[in-house]
Image (spheres, grey):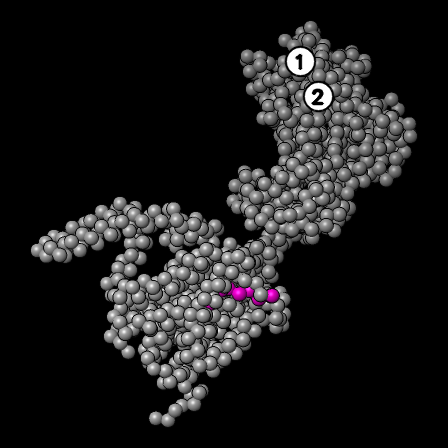
C-alpha cells in the first residue's frame, strides 16, 4: 500500500468508462440501427431467376413445329478463375486465346466477384466434352437454358425467331424483361410473345462470401415457381408446308393456302426460305448478317409484305363487284375483237385471243381483257355520277374483299397492299374530270394496284365461301384449354351476294376442267378444282407466274394462291404447284407426272447476281416511284423492288 | 487466524471468469467454422478441435503455475525476459511469415508466437525492476529504465512488423501511473494528445493551430495578471502546434499505406466497403444483424458463410455479436469488466510491490486487448490485428494470457507468505 492507492479508482473508472462506450456502441448498431440487418440479408440472399420453358408450337395435327432444346451457358466468376489451363478450355469450346482474354476482361469489367456469361449457348455435344474437364476450370460454371429448335427446319418467316432483349424492349416492358432475357422478335414468336414467354420464377438462395450457393432460404418459403409458356396450336399443316417449301426451292415467291370455312392458314411459304435453326445458337449473329445481306431477301415475308399487281386473277373480283353494282349480269355479253379500244379509239388494251362474243363465264374461262375493259368503263363512266365518285364506290367494294388494307393476320409486319384513292388520280391528272380510260389497266389487275399473296388467297377463300371470309390466321388454339381468339371467329362479308358467285365459279371451273382451259393441264383427277391462271407482265424480266384456286367446288376445303416471280406463264409454273398441293391436301397423294414434278423441283428462278444489271433495274423502277409502296416506310431496305412493279407495257406507252 | 488450505487460498472467482471466457471462446470458434453442409462430428483437425486441446493444456499449465513457489517468478524474471528477447530475435531469422508478419516460430505442427510471451516477460521484469526502486521516490531515471524494458521488445516486435502486438506493450503506462511515475497532468496531456491526433487527421492542421491560438489567446487574456501561467499556456500552445504538425507528417510519411487506410476508414475519410473498409463493414454488418437477442447458436449467416474475415481469431467477437445479439455481447463485456476490476482489486491487496505492479501490468494488457479488439469489430478503433484474450482461437495467445493470469493468481494465493 502506498500513497498512490487512490489511483486505483481512476484506473477502474477508465475500465468502466470504456466498457460503457463499447456497450453503448453495440446498443446503437445492434438495437437502434436496422440497416445492418438489411445489409446482412443483402449479403447472403441471391434472387435466382428460374427461366420458364417457352411455349411449344404444334401444327394443326399436333406435330411439333417449334420445341425447346437445352443449351448450356458457360459462366465465369473472374476472381476465382486463376491458374487454369487456358489452352484446353479454348480448344474445348472452340475459341482462340485472344477471344478468351476479351471474354474474361468483359466479365471482369462486369464484376470480378459475380458470375457473368463467358460463352453463350454451348450445344449439348460441346457441353458433354467440356463437362469431363470442368473440374479443372475453377471459377467456371455451366447454367442450362433452353433455346428454340425446329425439327423440320420449316416456316421460318411465320414462326419467327427470338433474340436477346435490347434496352428499348426493357424500357417498354416497364421492367418485365431484364438484360439477357429473350423476346420474340418476329413471326408468331413476337405476336404471341406474352403467351409464349411464360412466367419467371424466383428462388431465394443463400450464398457465402465467395458467392457459392449454400442452400435455399427458409426452405423455399418465399420462392415462386416458373410457369411454362402456353403452347400454341398452329393452323399450319406440317406435311403440306414441307411439300410447298420443297416445291418453292430456288424460286422467289409465295404460297398461301387457307381453309375457307375457318380462315385457318394451312400453308404459308415465303421463298427463298432458310433454316430457322440458323437463328439459334452461337453462330446466330453471323447467320443473321448473311441472311440480311442475301440479295434474294430470305428475311422478307413475301406473303404479307410483297405486293404485286394481281393480273388476270383480279378479273374474278372485277366480275363480282360489277355484278353487285348492277353494271353487268350473268347474261351480259361483250364483243371482243382482240382488244379493248378506248380514248376515242386511239388506244388499245390487247387480248391474247380474239374471243368474239364473250359472256361472263367465258370471260373468266379465257381471261378476256376486252370484257373487263367494258365492265370497268361501265363501272366508272355509266353510273350517273362523276368518275372519281364512281371509282371510290368501286374501291370501297374492293376493300370489302380485303384489298388495299391489312387483313389483320396474327403476324407482325403485314402490309396493306395498294388500291389508289380517287384523289391520287385527281392529283395526277390535275382535275377530277378523269374517266375509266385514264386508268383502264386497273380493270385487269395491272397498273398502280398492289395486292399481297395473302390477300389473293383470301379472295379465293371468299369465292369458295360464296361471299364471306374469316380473318386469315396462323394460330388456332392457345394453351391447354385451346382458346381461340374472338377476332378469328367473326364472319366478315365481302359485300357481294352469293348468287353472283356462280357464273364466276363456273368460269373458274371451266378454266381448269374443260380441255383448252388455261389450267387444264393441272386439273386434279377426281376433284372439281376451280382456278384461274395469271401471268403478270413484268417489264424488267420474265413475267410472274400466278395461279389461284379453290377445291373442291362444292364444300371447298382449300383456297390457294401461288406466286412464282420471274418464272413465266402461270399455267406452266404456278399451276403444277397448286395441283400438287391441292391433291396432296385433299387426297394425300400426288398424281402429276414424274416429269412435271421434276421440272418444278429442279427449276431455278433465282436471279444470277449481276451488279450492273441490278443498278439499271433500280434506276428504271425509280421512275414509277410515286406509285410505289407508300405503305412501307422502310421498303427501300425491306422489299425487293424490282419484282414489285409490273406495268402493262402497252398502257405505259399510251398513257395520256 | 488459521492458515487456509492451498485450494482455499486460490481466487476461484477469477478462475471461474477465466474459464467462462475460454468456454465462450470455444463455442464461438465452433460456430465460426461450422459448415452446415458438413456438420461433421468432433474433429481434431478443425479449429475448435485444436482449441479444445489448447484449453485443456491451458488448464494444466495454469494449475501447475499455482503449485510453483511464487518466489521463483520473482527471481527468474530476468532470465525469462532474456529467453523471450532471444526468441524475438530468433523469430526474425527463422520465423515463418504469415500474412506479412514474421511472427511465428514453427514447432512441428504448432507455431509459437514469441510476441505473445513478450508481454508476460516484460511485465515480470518491469515488476521486478520497479519494485526494487520503491524505497526511493519516483524519479525520471527509474522511469526511463522502466521505459527501456518495455521499448526493447517493442522494437523487436515492430521489426516483424506486428504493430498491433507492439502497441499492446504501451498499455503498461497504467503501471507507471499507479506507481506515481506518471502524474494526472501527464494523463490529461495524454488525453489531449489523442484528441489532437484524431483532430489532426480529420481537419487541416492550420485550422487546428488557429483554433488552438484562439483558445491560448483567451487564456492569456483571462490570466493576464499571472505571468507564470502565461508562459505555461504559451509553451503548451507551442507544444501542441508542433505536435499537430508532427502528427500530420508522421501520418503521411511514416505510417504504411494500409495502416493509413485503416485509420481513414475509421475516421470516415474514405468510404470503401469493398476495399479497405471491407473487413470493418462486414464485421459491423455481422454484429449489427444480431439485433437484441441474436440469431441463435450456429444460425449466424454472416460468419458461417465467411463474409467476416479472420472469424475465429481477431474477429471472433462478430460471431458473438451475430449469434447472441446485444444481450450476449453485453454479457461477455460484463465478464471482462468483472475480471479487470477484480484484477485491480487483487493488485491492491498484494503485500509486495512486485505482485502489485505485476497485477497492474496484467490488467493493463488484458484491458488493451479487450478494448482494441472489440473496438475494432464495432468500428470505434482502427483495425489492429490482436486477439481477444481467452476467446480468440490460437494456442500461443491462450497460453500466454493464461500464464500471465495464473502467475498473478499464484502471487495472490501466497501473498501472506511474501513480504514487501
Residue denoted by label 2: A643
Asked if labels 1 and 2 touch by Cβ distance under 8 angstroms, the answer is no
In the image, farthest residue toward the top: A346
Residue pictured at 45% horizontal, 53% vertical: B277
Q: Residues within 10 Å of mark 1 (few under 14, many from 20)?
A: few
B77 to the left or right of A494? left
> What quarter of the picture does the C terminus of chain A occupy?
top right
Q: In the figure, A111 relative to A463: above or below?
A: below
Q: How far across and down, in percent of the image, does residue A165 sit?
A: 59, 41
Q: Quadrant of residue A465?
A: top right
Direction from residue B278 to residue A94 in the image, left or right: right
* Residue A138: image tag: none
Residue at x 62% of width, y 17% of height: A625
Magenta range is B108-117
Q: Is residue A569 above or below residue A209?
A: above
Of residues A67 and A456, the one nearer the viewer is A67
Helix, strand or loop at label 1? It is helix
The image position of residue A557, as x and y in percent, is: 78, 39
Q: Is A628 on the left-hand or right-hand side of B342?
A: right
What chain does badge 2 belong to? A
Q: Which residue is mark 1?
A: A620
The extreme bottom residue here reads B2
Is any atom of residue B266 visible in this view? yes
Rendered view: A500 above or below B4 = above
Task: Assess whether residue B110 is covered by the magenta stretch.
Answer: yes
Residue located at (34% from left, 47% from top): B249
Amino acid at each position: 500500500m502506498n500513497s498512490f492507492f487512490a489511483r486505483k479508482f481512476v484506473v477502474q473508472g477508465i475500465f468502466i468508462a470504456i466498457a460503457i462506450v463499447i456497450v453503448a456502441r453495440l446498443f446503437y448498431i445492434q438495437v437502434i440501427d436496422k440497416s445492418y440487418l438489411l445489409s446482412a440479408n443483402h449479403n447472403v440472399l441471391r434472387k435466382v431467376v428460374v427461366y420458364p420453358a417457352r411455349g411449344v408450337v404444334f401444327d394443326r395435327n399436333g406435330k411439333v413445329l417449334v420445341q425447346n432444346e437445352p443449351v448450356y451457358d458457360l459462366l465465369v466468376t473472374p476472381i476465382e478463375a486463376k491458374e487454369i489451363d487456358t489452352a484446353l478450355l479454348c480448344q474445348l469450346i472452340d475459341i482462340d486465346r485472344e477471344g478468351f482474354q476479351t471474354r474474361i476482361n468483359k466479365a471482369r469489367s462486369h464484376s470480378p466477384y459475380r458470375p457473368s456469361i463467358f460463352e453463350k449457348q454451348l450445344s449439348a455435344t460441346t457441353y458433354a466434352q467440356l463437362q469431363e474437364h470442368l473440374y479443372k476450370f475453377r471459377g467456371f460454371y455451366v447454367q442450362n437454358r433452353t433455346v428454340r429448335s425446329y425439327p423440320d427446319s420449316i416456316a421460318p418467316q411465320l414462326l419467327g425467331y427470338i433474340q436477346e432483349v435490347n434496352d428499348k424492349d426493357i424500357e417498354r416492358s416497364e421492367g418485365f424483361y431484364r438484360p439477357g432475357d429473350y423476346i420474340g422478335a418476329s413471326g408468331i414468336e413476337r405476336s404471341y410473345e406474352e403467351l409464349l414467354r411464360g412466367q419467371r420464377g424466383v428462388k431465394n438462395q443463400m450464398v457465402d462470401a465467395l458467392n457459392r450457393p449454400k442452400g435455399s432460404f427458409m426452405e423455399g418459403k418465399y420462392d415462386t415457381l416458373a410457369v411454362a409458356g402456353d403452347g400454341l396450336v398452329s393452323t399450319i399443316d406440317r406435311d403440306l408446308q414441307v411439300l410447298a417449301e420443297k416445291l418453292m426451292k430456288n424460286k422467289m415467291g409465295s404460297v398461301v393456302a387457307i381453309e375457307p370455312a375457318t380462315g385457318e392458314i394451312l400453308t404459308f411459304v415465303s421463298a427463298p426460305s432458310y433454316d430457322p435453326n440458323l437463328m439459334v445458337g452461337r453462330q446466330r449473329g453471323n447467320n443473321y448478317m448473311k441472311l440480311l445481306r442475301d440479295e434474294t431477301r430470305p428475311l422478307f415475308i413475301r406473303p404479307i409484305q410483297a405486293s404485286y399487281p394481281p393480273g388476270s386473277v383480279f378479273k374474278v373480283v372485277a366480275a363480282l363487284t360489277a355484278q353487285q353494282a348492277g353494271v353487268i349480269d350473268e347474261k351480259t355479253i361483250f364483243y371482243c375483237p382482240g382488244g379493248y379500244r378506248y380514248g376515242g379509239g386511239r388506244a388499245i388494251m390487247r387480248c391474247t385471243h380474239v374471243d368474239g362474243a364473250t359472256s361472263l363465264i367465258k370471260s373468266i374461262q379465257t381471261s378476256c381483257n376486252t370484257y373487263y375493259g367494258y365492265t370497268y368503263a361501265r363501272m366508272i363512266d355509266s353510273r350517273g355520277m362523276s368518275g372519281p365518285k364512281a371509282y371510290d364506290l368501286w374501291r370501297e367494294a374492293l376493300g370489302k374483299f380485303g384489298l388495299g388494307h391489312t387483313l389483320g393476320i396474327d403476324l407482325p409486319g403485314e402490309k396493306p397492299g395498294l388500291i389508289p384513292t380517287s384523289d391520287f388520280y385527281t392529283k395526277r391528272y390535275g382535275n377530277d374530270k378523269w374517266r375509266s380510260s385514264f386508268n383502264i389497266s386497273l380493270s385487269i389487275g395491272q397498273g398502280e394496284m398492289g395486292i399481297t399473296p395473302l390477300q389473293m388467297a383470301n379472295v379465293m377463300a371468299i369465292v369458295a365461301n360464296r361471299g364471306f371470309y374469316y380473318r386469315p390466321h396462323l394460330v388456332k388454339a392457345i394453351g391447354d384449354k385451346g382458346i381461340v381468339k374472338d377476332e378469328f371467329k367473326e364472319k366478315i362479308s365481302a359485300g357481294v351476294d352469293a348468287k353472283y358467285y356462280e357464273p364466276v365459279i363456273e368460269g373458274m371451273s371451266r378454266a381448269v376442267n374443260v380441255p383448252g382451259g388455261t389450267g387444264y393441264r393441272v386439273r386434279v383427277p377426281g376433284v372439281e378444282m376451280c382456278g384461274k391462271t395469271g401471268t403478270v407482265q413484268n417489264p424488267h424480266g420474265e413475267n410472274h407466274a400466278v395461279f389461284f384456286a379453290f377445291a373442291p367446288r362444292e364444300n371447298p376445303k382449300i383456297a390457294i394462291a401461288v406466286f412464282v416471280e420471274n418464272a413465266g406463264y402461270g399455267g406452266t409454273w404456278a399451276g403444277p404447284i397448286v395441283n400438287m398441293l391441292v391433291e396432296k391436301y385433299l387426297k394425300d397423294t400426288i398424281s402429276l407426272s414424274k416429269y412435271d414434278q421434276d421440272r418444278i423441283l429442279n427449276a431455278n428462278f433465282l436471279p444470277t447476281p449481276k451488279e450492273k444489271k441490278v443498278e439499271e433495274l433500280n434506276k428504271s423502277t425509280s421512275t414509277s416511284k410515286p406509285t410505289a409502296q407508300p405503305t412501307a416506310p422502310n421498303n427501300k431496305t425491306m422489299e425487293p423492288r424490282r419484282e414489285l412493279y409490273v406495268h402493262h407495257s402497252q398502257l405505259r406507252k399510251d398513257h395520256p | 487466524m488459521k492458515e487456509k488450505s492451498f485450494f482455499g487460498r486460490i481466487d476461484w472467482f477469477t478462475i471461474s471468469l477465466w474459464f467462462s471466457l475460454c468456454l465462450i471462446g470455444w463455442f464461438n470458434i465452433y460456430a465460426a467454422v461450422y459448415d452446415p453442409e458438413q456438420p461433421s462430428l468432433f474433429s481434431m483437425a478443425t479449429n475448435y478441435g485444436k482449441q479444445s486441446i489448447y484449453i485443456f493444456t491451458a488448464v494444466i499449465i495454469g494449475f501447475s503455475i499455482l503449485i510453483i513457489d511464487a518466489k521463483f517468478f520473482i527471481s527468474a524474471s530476468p532470465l525469462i525476459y532474456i529467453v523471450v528477447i532471444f526468441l524475438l530475435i530468433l523469430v526474425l531469422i527463422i520465423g515463418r511469415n504469415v500474412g506479412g508478419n514474421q511472427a511465428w516460430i514453427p514447432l512441428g505442427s504448432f507455431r509459437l508466437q514469441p510476441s505473445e510471451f513478450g508481454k508476460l516477460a516484460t511485465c515480470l521484469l518491469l515488476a521486478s525492476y520497479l519494485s526494487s526502486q520503491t524505497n526511493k521516490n519516483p524519479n525520471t531515471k527509474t522511469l526511463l529504465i522502466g521505459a527501456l524494458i518495455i521499448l526493447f521488445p517493442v522494437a523487436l516486435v515492430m521489426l516483424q512488423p506486428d504493430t498491433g502486438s507492439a502497441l499492446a506493450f504501451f498499455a503498461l503506462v497504467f503501471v507507471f501511473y499507479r506507481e506515481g511515475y506518471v502524474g494526472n497532468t501527464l494523463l490529461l496531456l495524454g488525453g489531449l494528445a489523442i484528441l489532437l491526433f484524431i483532430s489532426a487527421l480529420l481537419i487541416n492542421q492550420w485550422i487546428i493551430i488557429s483554433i488552438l491560438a484562439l483558445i491560448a489567446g483567451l487564456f492569456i487574456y483571462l490570466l493576464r495578471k499571472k505571468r507564470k501561467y502565461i508562459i505555461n499556456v504559451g509553451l503548451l500552445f507551442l507544444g501542441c502546434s508542433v505536435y499537430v504538425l508532427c502528427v500530420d507528417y508522421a501520418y503521411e510519411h511514416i505510417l504504411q499505406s494500409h495502416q493509413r487506410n485503416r485509420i481513414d476508414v475509421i475516421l470516415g475519410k474514405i468510404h470503401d466497403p469493398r476495399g479497405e473498409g471491407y473487413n470493418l463493414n462486414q464485421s459491423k454488418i455481422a454484429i449489427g444483424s444480431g439485433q437484441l437477442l441474436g440469431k441463435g447458436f450456429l444460425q449466424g449467416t454472416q460468419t458461417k458463410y465467411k463474409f467476416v474475415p479472420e472469424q475465429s481469431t481477431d474477429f471472433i467477437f462478430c460471431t458473438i455479436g451475430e449469434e447472441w445479439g446485444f444481450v450476449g455481447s453485453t454479457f461477455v463485456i460484463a465478464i471482462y469488466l468483472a475480471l479487470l476490476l477484480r484484477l485491480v482489486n487483487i493488485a491492491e491487496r498484494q503485500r509486495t510491490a512486485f505482485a502489485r505492479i505485476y497485477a497492474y501490468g496484467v490488467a493493463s494488457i488484458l484491458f488493451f486487448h479487450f478494448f482494441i479488439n472489440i473496438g475494432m469489430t464495432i468500428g470505434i478503433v482502427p483495425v489492429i490485428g490482436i486477439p481477444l484474450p481467452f476467446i480468440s482461437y490460437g494456442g500461443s495467445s491462450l497460453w500466454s494470457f493464461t500464464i500471465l493470469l495464473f502467475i498473478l493468481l499464484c502471487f495472490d494465493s501466497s501473498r501472506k507468505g511474501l513480504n514487501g
